[in-house]
Image (tube, rainbow, N blue to C red):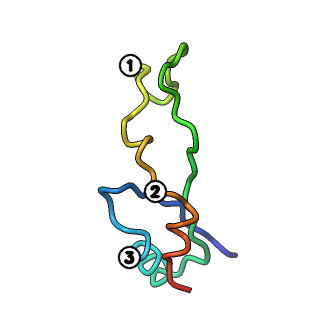
């Protein structure tokens, strides 16, 4: 069975190269990064993932997945 790992990497977390190397050393077969291209400035509905309905600030700071995956070692 092949198992991958998804990482939510931001500008203040571990970099994608370090994370990818560690994931590979632990035996993972794939490395995925999320994409969130549009962050609404004003929302009419509450964010469903938090108790107060406010979207966490960290979601606005994901690294670009294409850059992060290009930096990951082969």
* CB-based contact (under 8 Å), mark 1 and mark 2: no
Residue to which mark 1 is pinned: 52
Q: Nearer the viewer, residue 35 or 1?
A: 35
* Secondary structure type for disc 2: loop
Q: Position of residue 70 (x, y in %)?
A: 55, 74
Name which residue lies at 32% across and 59% down.
13
Disc 3 or disc 2, which is closer to the eye? Answer: 2
Q: For the point 56% across and 45% down, which residue is it?
A: 36
Q: Which mark is residue 18?
A: 3
Question: Given this view, does label 1 or label 2 mark the residue nearer the observer?
Answer: 2
Residue 50 position (above or below residue 20)? above
Q: Quadrant of the C terminus?
A: bottom right
* Comes first in the chain, label 3 or label 1: 3
Q: CA distance from mark 3 to mark 2?
A: 14 Å
Q: Is residue 55 shown above or below 13?
A: above
Task: Note whether 27 is above or below 30 in the view shown.
Answer: below
Q: Residues within 10 Å of mark 3 (few under 14, many from 20)?
A: few
Residue in the image at 29% along x and 56% along y: 12
Q: Which quarter of the rendering shows the N terminus?
A: bottom right
Q: Nearer the viewer, mark 3 or mark 1?
A: 3
Tell which residue pokes out farthest to the top in this image. 44
What x and y, as percent, mark residue 66?
58, 64
User: What SS does tag 3 mark?
Assistant: helix
Q: Residues within 10 Å of mark 2 (few under 14, many from 20)?
A: many
Q: CA distance from mark 1 to mark 2?
A: 25 Å
Q: Residue at x 42, y 76 (%)?
A: 17
Specify which label sits upstream in the sequence, 1 or 2.
1
Count of numbered circles in the view? 3
Q: Nearer the viewer, residue 69 or 41?
A: 41
| Residue that mark 2 sits on | 63
Which x, y percent locates residue 68? 50, 67
């Amino acid at each position: 069975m092949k198992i991958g790992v998804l990482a939510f990497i931001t500008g203040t977390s571990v970099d994608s190269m370090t994370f990818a190397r560690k994931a590979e050393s632990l035996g993972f077969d794939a490395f995925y990064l999320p994409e969130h291209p549009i962050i609404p400035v004003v929302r009419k509905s509450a964010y469903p993932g938090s108790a107060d309905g406010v979207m966490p600030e960290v979601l606005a700071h994901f690294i670009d997945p294409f850059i992060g995956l290009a930096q990951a070692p082969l």
